[in-house]
Image (cartoon, rainbow, N blue to C red):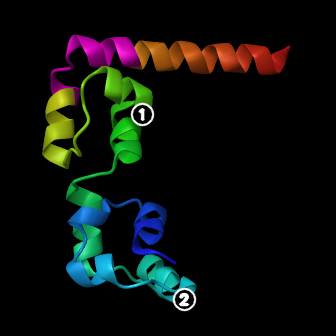
Amino acid sequence: MKPATAAKKLGILLTAAPDDFQSTPITREELDALRDNPPEWLVDLRRNGPFPRDVVAAKLGVSKSGLARGGQTDPLDADQIGELLADPPAWLVRERETLRDTIAENQRLRER
């Protein structure tokens, strides 16, 4: 599989991975080995980032669209996410509320 696909499956930002990972196709067996016994660089990326948008959105409790509306288009690392959570700006508070409302509405519709 392409390195971009493998990075997505591992939940990491491709551009933050080592060059050999970025330029070499990954087999399913290699991907499974990375999941089962991650090398130090992978452990560090998963812990500290920078993280891809979907991971940033999940850590902040907003949607990917909410990140864009909030002007967060660049990958963030763990420290930047921690700063946003410690002192949430208005857009983050609003987008978290929007996501909660959307989830509640979807749940209500499912129960009908």
Residue at 38% of width from left, 36% of height from top? 57
Q: What residue lies at 49% left-to-right and 64% top-to-bottom?
A: 9
In the image, residue 37 lies at what x, y percent?
A: 40, 83
Query: How many labels, in total?
Result: 2
Which mark is on residue 35?
none
Residue 77 vertical placement versus 2 (above, below):
above
Residue under circle 2?
29
Q: SS class of the residue under badge 2?
A: helix
Which is more toward the observer, 10 or 16? 16
Q: Which residues are magenta?
A: 85-95
- Residue 86 magenta: yes
Q: Residue at x 36, y 85 (%)?
A: 24
x then y, percent, for residue 81: 21, 38
Q: Is 54 rendered above or below residue 46?
A: above
Corner quadrant of residue 4? bottom left
**Looking at the picture, which amino acid does disc 1 mark?**
Lys
Q: Are marks 2 and 1 in contact (CB under 8 Å)?
A: no
Q: Which residue is mark 1?
A: 64
